Image: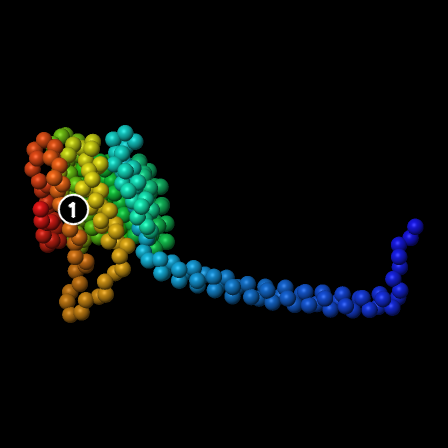
Amino acid sequence: MTGRQLPARSIGVALPRAGRSIRLLRRRIGERRAAAPLLALALAWVLAGSAAQAGPSVRVFAIRGVAGILFSRGMNALCDELADVAAVTCTVEDFTEVPVIEAEARAADRAGQRVVLVGHSMGADTAIRVAAETGLPVAMVAAIDPPQFRVRPVPDNVALVLNYYQQIDVLGRGVVSTVPGFRGRVFRIELDEPHIVIDRDPEIHAAIINEIRSLLEPAPPPAIDRVDRGPAPRALPAASERPAVRTGRPPVYSVDAGVAPPRQ
């Protein structure tokens, strides 16, 4: 059995039509290839515009101290609370993970995120160390009861320092210092909370979250005819009405940069 053969005339008509179809297909493929870079550029422009409209974002590192999985659980709780705040990413780290934290902080800074370092005990020491070693612009360091014999000076690339400490047990007790010429704001707050639970204090968490929320607000327009000394400090939450541990006295504030302590 043989296949059906087309007449010579049909073949002569079909070949030119096939050639025209192939040329048209090639032309359309070429047009699409030429348009691809323009489409990619337009997509990048749209994405960039969307990111700009979305506003700033904040990258928070909550750093635990020695045996942090048992004694620095307040860092986990802080990230859980921040999970409900839009445009904030919070991860729990251990104080020994300095290279990882520094690499992720650099990546966050390159992505345009504001970097916040929070630490308890040795985690507080690591927070200051990361700020110093990376040299990145750090929006805030919250040092919660760092070890008193290993408190590093806060570098000048940090805009705000919240230092919570206690003097009722032998652990912690660290009061931070700053490098000469430090231009940021420093709040040192003494509380009557034992070292192993001070990182869970709801007032501390409220103050930290309050400052993080302020980083998400649009920057105010520059002032005219005055020296710009940075944004006004946000008031820290007042002491709660629950009885303080042991002494019951109110928090003791020490404030640098000419800023008055929050009123009770």
Determine the image quadrant of residue 101: top left
Q: Could you say where residue 30 lies in the image, as x and y percent from the top left?
A: 62, 66
Q: Is residue 135 visible?
A: no
Q: Residue at x 19, y 38 (%)?
A: 201
* Residue nearer the viewer, 162 or 202: 202
Name the residue type under label 1. Answer: Pro
- Location of residue 219 by image quarter: bottom left
Give the structural element (helix, strand or loop) at label 1: loop
Across and down, in percent, residue 209 comes to 24, 47
Count of numbered marks: 1
Q: Is residue 208 left or right of residue 27?
A: left
Residue ID at (25%, 43%): 118
Task: Give the residue pinned by disc 1.
Answer: 237
Residue positioned 22% across, 36% down in the render: 200
Q: Residues within 10 Å of mark 1 (few under 14, many from 20)?
A: some
* Residue 255: percent from left, percent from top: 11, 49
Residue 122 image point, x, y percent: 24, 36
Could you tell me if residue 226 is visible in this image?
A: yes
Is residue 90 shown left or right of residue 246? right
